[in-house]
Image (cartoon, coloured by chain):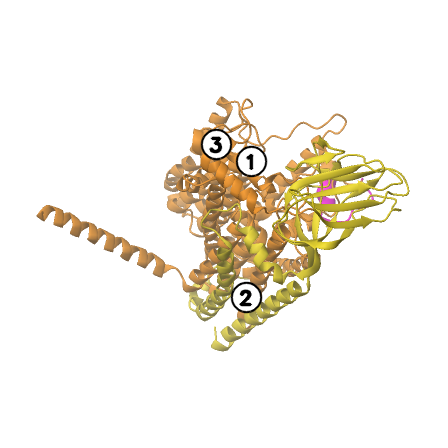
Amino acid sequence: MSRASARWGVITFAVIAVLGLVGLLSAAANDKRTVAFSLDIPPVSEVTILSPQESACEGPLETQAAFGGIQIFLIPGAVPGAAFELTVRDSGSGALLATGHLAPGYTTRIAPRIILDSAVPAGRSVEVCLHNQGPTRAAPIGGPGNLVERVQGQIVPLDVTLTFLRRHPRSLLSLLPTAFDRAALFHPRLVGAWTFWLLTGALLVAFALGVVALARAAHGDGDDSEEANQPLRP
Amino acid sequence: MILSGTVQVSRRGEAAGGLRAARRAFAAVPSPLAALLGVVAIFGVTWALIVPPGQSPDSTSHFAYAQTLAENFALPGNPLRPGVSSDQRQAIIADHVNEITSSPLTVKPDWSAADYQRYLNTVAHTHLSRSDGGGPSSAAPNPPLYYLFADLAYWADSGGDAFSRMYAMQLWGVVLLLLTVTGGWLLAGEVLGRRRLPQLACAAVVGFVPTETFLATSITPDSLLVTLWTLGLWLGARVISRAARPVDAAALCAVAAAAILTKATSYALLPAVAFALAIGWWARPKEERIKALRQLAPALLVLAAPVLAWVAYSRANGRSPVNVVAPAVAGSSANPRQFLSYVWQFYLPRLQFMSPSIAEPGAYFSIWIREAWATFGWLDVPIVQWIYSVIGWICGAFLVAGAVLMTRVRGRRNLALLAYFVLALVGLLALLHVTDYLTILSSGYALLQGRYVLPVIGLFGLIVAFVISRLPTPLRAPVCGAVLGALLVLQVLSLGTVAETYYT
């Protein structure tokens, strides 16, 4: 195999690798994410049916990140769907931290993103309440979870699905440190976020090793031409 | 004193000899393969650590099986015991991820540092039994070989918590990935000659199809299965090419037996193995054939003894040696005509005289392309959809080019190799489709998943290598470079998809 051919092999590899990686970085920089964190409760069934002026409260729960909105899942009991007030309170003092509202009038199952009037910081222990403001009944959706869910003060077995949203969306690329911090949990104790930064660097080294593999293969490809005449050939 | 000095010198001498032998062995590895193995190791370790615990198909059951074997030296399936141990149960409760009942695309895991700290405190202050599992699970009917392999890592990290042991097992899978890639390299070398570019292409395909890298570093017998089938394809080619030398025949039979003791799917490899042995034996000069039969007998024993022992053990303990499909429900009995129609419609448009298929028509793309190439988690984490179409077109181009080139293959050895590979492929597909068909009849649900076809990934790698080997010389390196570059970019995309799906 000629040096020129080997060189073209490496160039082709490099062009595809660079274009691919730049494309991925660009996509990650432009992919805006709104989810701050969730509670890992799947929206699989009705938690309860809230009549007008009834409330369902969930907590205490720790805020993993700052948020300025909450997504819930609702099924209207009748048309028009009920209005809801959503409140976030400090679970220790009961102080009101933020409030949001859902307008009435929906007709089918919805997953509205309710904007809060102020941002709630990370690291707080809070309780989130849904208050049905009428005029009809509605069912918040949730599933099995490890939190305490109270409907009109009574504990119920399922938890409401809540997804906490950022006030300002962040790019996927900027979330890399968050992703690595999270990935380090529930791993061997030796593993930390640093491990994933190191591996990210190692992936770049892997591309360089790929160049080495290709260049060496291209140079060595003609070495065994006699033997190459033996095997599967037309 | 003198004696002690002599012993020390002798030990030093042995150590130096061992080191020299290791250096010689390392030097014998072709440099492109060594570099490629470095790339594979980096991606493999990244995969092993980035996937959250329990987020590969049935890994909870597979860990439970391995733990039962490691702690109790017994196989699971006892109906009087729980499916998982207290140790594993605590881990499942702690991270929530294992128990999530909907896709991470709908609701993300919560990644609570406080939950993790609580788990660590619980583990530090509570005795959680590791041996009280062993009950029924989806993995319980499997043979034990993979779990024994995984237990080497489990035992090595026996002082760690459940997560630590899970990840030790996943990291141990990188060894299987390296072996699979080496098998791909050897397969292309045996069939096409020591031509480094085709060998590199074959090994790269085998190692960097993202689903394969993901599975190899998950807790699942599929990881060992792919390794053994790839080595089996290489050894079968050796047996055919080199007139069934006893050592090759024994190695092929050992690998086939190991594959059967890993997963019952590997019975599909037996017709191809029998064919390779027969052709290899027939290639001997006439006067040597009787002697050759005597030489091959130990190899057959290597295959038969462990398999028959497993069958006998299973029967004696009330287990089924193979996975059993429940009988068809009333009014839906199996018939060959319906089966053929189902297979036809799996791959091709329905013909006018055919009834609608009992399965999803045209499912080959979603299963053999989408799932087999790049779908992660519990089949609920796909990559960007349009990339599957690109992969499909590229695969199609290589398959068509390979098929055209194969029509020009001449010579007894080459045709025998071709027949061997076709037998392995058709054997696997036939077994999968028959099982899928019977499962649909009995339960109404399709069984096929993309990962089930990965045992023959070496054949796809070989086709890519074959096409590259037939290109004009100036094009070989650029096409090989394009294949390698595209595979590595696809790997990064897949890792990024997994990371963003679970962790953002």
Pinpoint residue B209: horizontal percent, then vertical percent: 57, 55
Which of these two is toward me, B311 or B351? B311
Image disc number at residue B128: 3
Q: Mark 3 lies on which chain?
A: B
Q: Where does the magenta region start and end?
A: B341-355
| Amino acid type, residue under disc 1 in the picture | Ser
Horizontal side of B70 relative to B409 (left or right) equals: left
Label disc, if present, on residue B71 of the rendered structure:
none
**Secondary structure at numbered mark 3:** loop
The answer to if B344 sits in the magenta stretch is: yes
Chain identifier of the yellow chain: A
Q: Which quarter of the picture shows residue B447?
A: top right
Nearest to N terminus: mark 3 or mark 2: 3
Dot 1 falls on which chain?
B
**Is residue B388 among what the camera can see?**
yes
Where is mark 2, residue-wise?
A: B480
Q: Residue at x 49, y 47 (%)?
A: B227
Closer to the camera: disc 3 or disc 1?
3
Task: For label 2, count other residues whose C-alpha is less than 10 Å away and answer few (under 14), some (14-19) or many (20+).
Answer: many
Q: Name the residue under label 1.
A: B61
Measured in 3D between alpha carbons, the distance from the residue under mark 3 to the one under mark 2, in whole angstroms, is: 52 Å
